[in-house]
Image (spheres, grey):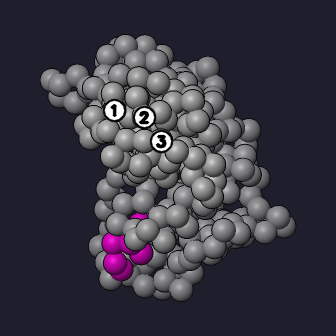
Amino acid sequence: MTDTLITRRDQPRIETAARLEAEDITIGYDGRVVSEHLDVEIPPGSFTVVVGPNACGKSTLLRAFARLLKPREGRVLLDGRAIAELPTKEVARRLGLLPQTSIAPDGIRVSDLVARGRHPHQTILRQWSHDDQTAVAAALAATGTTALAGRLVDELSGGQRQRVWVAMLLSQESPTMLLDEPTTFLDIAHQYDLLRLFHGLHREGRTIVAVLHDLNQAARFADHMVMMRDGSVVASGAPSSIVTAERVHEVFGLECTVIADPHSGTPLVVPC
């Protein structure tokens, strides 16, 4: 994978970063409530990382932002408009989601799966075009999966599949990207490659919202963090202001020391 995403000549035109917010939402599954009266605002153009212990509501919040989970109360707003009321294709053009687990159709090739990211841009009058082909090629190159284009997705390793799913998301060219544990199945080198890729997309104008388990990776790449526990937001803001030894102990129950990362200067959690 390469840090250089797309050359300026081929770089896609990204819409203005959207304002995404949850307003007094209550969310859950079946009869279980995960979060009540939750207010979360994602700064436009930010790289926001949501962190917290297992089962604290991180992925549930992301599903609500992606319109996959309807709040029981409250609403999710996209640029001030209720996302539930927007046309499906408009939402798909403006929000891209990488879920925690993805299942590809049997017998599909990598290039065809990545091309599915272009579906929100197509209509009866606008079918496959040169722009679509360019977007797919750029997404494959950015994720280091060009050589896999002709292979069946079923034949790939877990890490290769994850990068292919990321390529499909990139081909969608959405200005806001929602990522639920995007480094799953990846070794540490590819984890950092992928996070650098998303950091580059953020610097080019996209809003990135990611759920991560690694607090040090979150602190290094995010410019905005949301820290959750038991379905509630404990703190939000710049990593330098919210990643403290006291708060890590409060949220994760971990005794630690927080020092400056020697390479990035960002907070680095060292367990005691």
| Image location of residue 156, percent across then percent down | 36, 80
> Depth check: 97 or 234 in front?
234
Three-letter amino acid code at the position of disc 1: His
Give the quadrant of the N terminus: bottom right
What residue do we see at 74% from left, 38% from top?
A: 16
* Mark 3 vs 1, N-terminal side: 1
Tell me the CA gap for discs 3 and 1: 11 Å
What residue do we see at 66% from left, 33% from top?
A: 44
What is the secondary structure assignment of the residue under circle 2? helix
Q: Are marks 3 and 2 in contact (CB under 8 Å)?
A: yes
Q: Are marks 2 and 1 in contact (CB under 8 Å)?
A: yes
Tell me the CA gap for discs 3 and 2: 6 Å
Q: Which residues are magenta?
A: 156-163
Res 249 label: 1
Answer whether residue 263 is magenta in the image: no
| Image location of residue 231, percent across then percent down | 31, 25
